Structures are given as C-alpha cells and as structure tokens.
Image: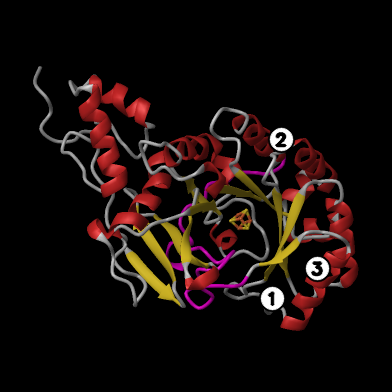
C-alpha cells in the first residue's frame, strides 16, 4: 500500500485524537500499531512530528511577559487568534510549577460586565485541535518567556495544571472541551493528571450536569469544576452576569449540590471582588449562606480593571476584610494573588482589542 508522503486534511491528528483513536486512524493509513503509538508519544512528549500526520501547530504569533506571567497568541486558519497564559505557581522552598490557562472560544457570548473578553462578543468556538495545541505550543514552541530560565531539550516547558479560564465559556463548547480533556489526560499523550485539570464556568447548569456525567467515567473522576459566582444575591448577579437572568442562583445551587462529590477534591466558587458592587461584609455573609452545605472552597479574586472599566481595583483592606469575614463564617476561603496585570493576562482580561469589531456570532443565553 502506498502512503501519502505529506499530511492532508484526513491525516491522523494527534492534537484532536486520543491515543486509541489516533492508532485506529493511523492504521487506516497503513501504519502499524506500535509505529502509530510511538509517533503519538513522540509528538506529546518531545514535540517530534511525522510527515504523515496532520501538521504541527504554528509558533505563537506574539508573546507578552510580565512579572513571570507569559501570555501567548496562536493565529488560526481564519486569522483569529487564541490567547493562553502560562502562570508560575510558587511552592515551598522557592520551587514553582506552571499552570496553563487555555481558551475554549475566541471571545465569549456571556457578557459578564467585569470581563475584558466579553467586550469582544463571541467570534467562534474552538475545535479540539485548537484547544489542545495551546498546551503543545506552551510546552514546545514558546521560547523562554521567563528571563532567568533556559528551556530544556526541545524547548519543553513543563505544565503541571490546565485551567479552562481563558477566553470563552467552556460549557458552550463542551463536546470539544471534553474531548480535549480526554487527550490532555491520555497517558500516552500529554499525561496531565485529571486532578490538575479544572473547568471554570459562568454557571451554565446544563453543562455542569453533563460534566458531572463525564467525571463518573473511569479515569476522569477528579477533573475540577470552578463556578464563577461573583455575587451574594440575584439582583447583583443579574446586573453583572446576564446568565443569571436565565439561570438564577437557586438553579445554580441545585446544580452545584447535585454535582458528584469527590473524596479529596471539592468544587470551587470564584468570587471577583468589585469595589462598590459586591464587597460589603454582608455580601460575604450572604455568599457563605449560599455555599453552606455545598462542599466548596471560596476563591476571592481582586478585580482586575478591564479597559474602560467603570470600577477600580479593590484596596487591600477591603479584600482582607472580605476574606476574614468569610472565614469567620466557617467558609474555607482563599485569596487569589493577582498576576499578569500589566500584560492584560490576569483573570478576566483576555481579549484581543485588534480583533474586536469583527463579525460576532449571536448566541442567546435565554433558553
Ligand atoms: S467571565 Fe468568562 S463567561 Fe464571563 S464573559 Fe468573560 S470569558 Fe465569558
């Protein structure tokens, strides 16, 4: 049987297929099982590609670094771009691991008032390949974004954690997100531990239920779920997050309560603290009341002002008081340290001003 000398659209794509799917696809192209599996491992572990596969992703279009956070952009076939952020997470003894924040869409339809990405609207959802290639580019093609580090062989930056907290609402592109998780966690592929993958959602309850079904499958039990809560009551949440008008807090709470419990990990409720909006002590009390009975940590994130923001960043005293009040309520609470503010790489700040104004895909959130 003659083999195609170069990749075609139908060539097996290691960024879109699990190892089992890739081997099956490669066998239809005349490759042996062992050859195909070794080639799949070589792509994900060493960044080495074969000519009979789908082509490798392009190098990042642009990279911005800021206080050790690196944001990089990958140009897509239709001239849109994905944005991803590599964030160092410090550990004891001066060591650190790296978290990669990936996008699931270009732009977002959810319209959260505090979010830079929302200013773009939704341009389109990403394919599985376009999601997974963000890890591949971070590992093998981003060259030395941190000034005091030398990339190891093949330019490999080790990524320990993946969070779906970049551009887009993962639950609006859930088929592609779940397939990308199967690949990211594939032991013959990137082999990211499932407990090190977290999906962050605006609170779409249909997606929370589907993710709950997904994690009951063997091997995916410890995939994490973070809910963007951001408000103590429906009035405030509806004002800053349009999703709440379609799916109010009672509905969200029911979905969180029904989410399968895990022995060692819990849900995370994210709370972007915005001055004059949701930062009062009684707001902390109400949030803790909402979370009572749900095994859940509260992650307080000081607001990062987006471009043309109507709100400033909160001051330290307000942040400390809010966190202390939540802890006094008996709620396990953490404060997220802000990284990457000046590179517009911090939470809620992804979104490319150059591609705004392009055709927006209209996706309503009323159902
Ligand atoms: S916060 Fe998340 S869900 Fe809301 S608009 Fe931004 S990217 Fe979309």
In the foreground, 357 or 278: 278
10 Å neighbourhood of mark 2: few (<14), some, or many (≥20)? some
Residue 301 falls in which quadrant of the image?
bottom right
Among numbered discs 2 and 3, the one appearing first in the sequence: 2
In the foreground, 242 or 201: 201
SS at badge 2:
loop
285 over 64 or under it: above or below: above
Image position of 263 (left or right of 325): left
Question: Ligand 1 is in which quadrant of the figure?
Answer: bottom right
Residue 310's disc is 1
Tell me the magenta residue range: 337-366
Please identify, in this view, whether the residue under mark 2 or under mark 1 is nearer the observer: 2
Residue 260's disc is 2
Could you tell me which residue is drawn at 82 percent across and 48 percent down? Answer: 249
Residue 248: % across, % down = 81, 46
Among numbered discs 1 and 3, the one appearing first in the sequence: 3
Tell me the CA gap for discs 2 and 3. 29 Å
């Amino acid at each position: 049987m003659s083999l195609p000398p170069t990749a075609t659209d139908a060539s097996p794509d290691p960024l879109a297929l699990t190892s089992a799917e890739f081997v099956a696809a490669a066998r239809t192209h005349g490759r042996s099982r062992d050859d195909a599996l070794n080639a799949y491992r070589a792509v994900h572990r060493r960044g080495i590609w074969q000519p009979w596969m789908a082509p490798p992703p392009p190098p990042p279009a642009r990279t911005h670094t800021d206080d050790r956070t690196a944001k990089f952009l990958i140009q897509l076939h239709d001239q849109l771009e994905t944005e991803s952020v590599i964030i160092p997470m410090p550990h004891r003894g001066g060591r650190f691991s790296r978290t990669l924040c990936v996008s699931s869409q270009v732009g977002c339809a959810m319209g959260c008032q505090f979010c830079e990405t929302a200013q773009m609207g939704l341009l389109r959802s990403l394919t599985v390949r376009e999601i997974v290639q963000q890890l591949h580019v971070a590992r093998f093609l981003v060259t030395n974004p941190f000034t005091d580090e030398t990339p190891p062989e093949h330019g490999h930056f080790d990524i320990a954690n993946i969070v779906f907290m970049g551009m887009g609402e993962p639950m609006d592109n859930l088929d592609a997100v779940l397939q990308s998780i199967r690949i990211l966690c594939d032991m013959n592929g990137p082999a990211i531990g499932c407990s090190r993958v977290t999906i962050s959602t605006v609170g779409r309850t249909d997606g929370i239920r589907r993710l709950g079904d997904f994690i009951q499958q063997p091997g995916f039990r410890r995939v994490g779920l973070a809910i963007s809560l951001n408000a103590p009551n429906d009035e405030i949440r509806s004002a800053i997050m349009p999703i709440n008008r379609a799916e109010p807090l009672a509905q969200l709470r029911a979905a969180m309560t029904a989410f399968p419990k895990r022995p060692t990990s819990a849900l995370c409720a994210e709370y972007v603290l915005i001055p004059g909006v949701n930062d009062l002590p009684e707001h902390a009390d109400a949030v803790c009341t909402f979370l009572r009975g749900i095994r859940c940590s509260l992650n307080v994130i000081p607001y990062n002002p987006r471009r043309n923001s109507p709100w400033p960043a909160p001051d330290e005293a307000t942040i400390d008081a809010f966190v202390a009040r939540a802890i006094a309520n008996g709620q396990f609470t953490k404060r997220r340290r802000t990284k990457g503010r000046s590179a517009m790489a911090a939470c809620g700040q992804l979104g490319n001003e150059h591609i705004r104004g392009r055709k927006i895909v209209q996706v309503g959130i009323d159902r």
